Amino acid sequence: MGNGYVVPALVAVTLITVGIGFYGLRLARTTSDFLVASRAVSPTWNAAAIGGEYLSAASFLGVAGLILKHGVDVLWYPVGFAAGYLALLLFVAAPLRRSGAFTLPDFCELRLGSRRLRTLATTFVIFIGWLYLVPQLQGAGLTMATLTGSPYPLGALLVAAVVTANVALGGMRAITFVQAFQYWLKLTALAVPAIFLVLQWQADSRPAVTPPEGPTFRTATTVVVEHPATLTLPDGQQQQIRPGDELTFAAGQPVPQVAGTATDPADWLLPSTGADEQGLFTTYSLILATFLGTMGLPHVLARFYTNPDGAAARHTTLVVLALVGAFYLLPTVYGALGRIYTPHLLLTGETDAVVLLLPGAALGTGTTGRLLAALVAAGAFAAFLSTSSGLLTSVAGVISTDLLGRGSVRGFRLATVLAGSVPMVLALNVSGLEVSQVVGLAFAVAASSFCPLLVLGIWWRGLTARGAAVGVLVGGGAAAGAVLVTVLGPPLTGWPAALLAQPAAWTVPLAFTVMVAVSGATRRHVPTDVGATMLRLHAPEALR
Amino acid sequence: MVAADDRVSARTRIVLADVVRRESRGEQLRTEHPHTELTEQTRVGEALVRGLVRAQLSLALRLWLVVAVGLGGLPWLFAIAPSVSRVTVLGVHLPWVLLGGLSFPFLVLVGWAYVRLAERNEQDFTDLIQRPER
């Protein structure tokens, strides 16, 4: 797009990340390894690191894109992404840290003493990890394509290769400092341009976000269509558009309505009403998936181990909740201002690019606009570098220890290449899906498999290995099946589409019910050391 | 932590820690302290732990209920009373204010309350265990 600052910004972020990673690793061998194990990492640093790893491409790019497209109903995504940390705090944080488990499979073996359950948990860690990695690479491809005009697959391949090589060679491994840096970079990269954008909006004498006649083009715009769609023109005519079509609009002309998006001001501005039962179901299902899914994400859990004890784990989670909540105030600003300054994204279907394009569109091509656009691009790059590195490390970790059965460095490298190539192939084939939607599916699977396992494992003595295994298989399997049908299957409409696209509302209760029922039926197999395990999970540190 | 607690009854505290360590290794319990019935301590200890777990769980569930009603009730409220969503605060519609802005401090507030109350539960438990025997 002719912004000379963007490429240097992306290169700088990558070099800094890789550089700190390698430099930090050398330090880690001598001192910080030890420091992590002792209490030198304060909850604030740790929380920034967790936030840095958590705020992914979906949060940085996807949420604003969804808000631009669908309006108020998708505000539940950021609320749920943040509320997930509250669920983690209430039900999991302190006992999980006290258990001493480093990964979910560790927790399974520790609590229920079953190797087979461990293998099952490993399978789900890999599935969820891959499902979560795909949208990160998608976001990378989108960012590169939007900013430098390179073809979509190139960006996805490039970032996948960089991250895989980096993790395989040892950079970015659990270095608290890198991840904490990424959090503050991401926050700055959204907050600073947001201030300028709001000032610009004031200077433009506050154009209405939802004018009664619908969004209009502020400047003469030529739109190149990238996804097929059906338009409703202002005179009521229907028009089919195909990728490659060019549409030209004059300044002040209304934006045609696109089928499947909330172009109608009232739809966008106001929540779905009682008449729309599927809408309500989808909203609740989404809330449940994000609220309960966070605790089951593989890369979130591993970071808790760096807390010295259960009390610190609690404080860390609270700070994460505050940091993540502060971040999620920002995408709404971008989504709303995008209605004014970048309405053409509704036509191209590339709404995920709104965060990247808004600074240039609103502030013009002067130095300020270009610098801020480069800053946003750097933040986006930080988002998928940190999240995908964290995920890849977790997935490769379980592959190398649980499937390859070796703890060697070579085994880990092999596992990393294996773990990195599958989502890379997948990312090339799902470019039509929204980033946040795919992430939502990963949350649904995590909420239907690991959430019941963790919650019942921590709070209920009656859980048995068989109950846990069957519950994970049925609940997680149902959610995973729904994901596969949504991503690969034929397009559906009505209730089947709603039930499969947002499955959590029925798969989470299913998983809990099955787990409790089967555990009750196999009561004889309750681990004999459950009393000692409970003591270990819940007794305060002062008594150790 | 341990060093700071020297003034409290050391005997009971060490016993509990021993039970944790030994049981997690699967070893048989042996009587090391002639004055203490370890088995009985375990039974008493287990009852106490059950009490702690129940207290912490009910605390978590109660705060979860606060969030479930406070936030989870919103889609339902907007659905049955569409007029609520048309209310504006400083020119912004109420659903945007509640979801886009106020929900985050609300979550942090609930989390803060939980941390305080959960730590108080643990303090009560610690006091109970470390109370000198009469």
Image (tube, rainbow, N blue to C red):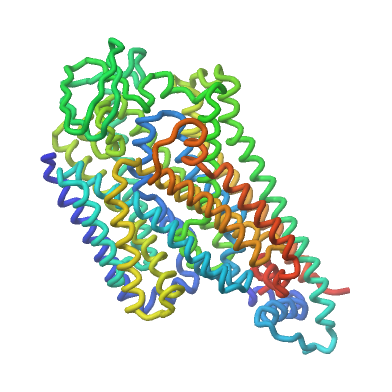
Q: Where residue A292 sits: x, y (%)? A: 55, 49
Q: Count the marks: how many?
A: 0
Residue at image location 57% in from the left, 30% down from the top: B74
Q: Where residue B33 sits: x, y (%)? A: 80, 88
Q: Where residue A371 sits: x, y (%)? A: 19, 42
Q: Where residue A342 sits: x, y (%)? A: 26, 28
Residue at image location 47% in from the left, 62% down from the top: A125
Residue A371 vs residue A492: left or right? left
Foreground residue, A343 or A191?
A343
Foreground residue, A122 or A207?
A122
Residue A417 vs residue A311: left or right? left
B54 vs B10: above or below? above
Quadrant location of the N terminus of chain A? Answer: top left
Q: Which residue lies furthest to the right in this view?
A: B134
- The answer to which quarter of the image holds residue A24 is bottom left
Residue A395 vs residue B72: left or right? left
Is residue A42 visible in the rendered structure shown here?
no
Quadrant location of the C terminus of chain A? Answer: bottom right
Residue at image location 74% in from the left, 86% down from the top: B28
Q: Residue furthest front?
A: A490
Q: Which residue lies furthest to the top in this view?
A: A235
Foreground residue, B105 or A389?
A389
- The answer to which quarter of the image holds residue A157 is bottom left
Is residue A103 visible in the rendered structure shown here?
yes
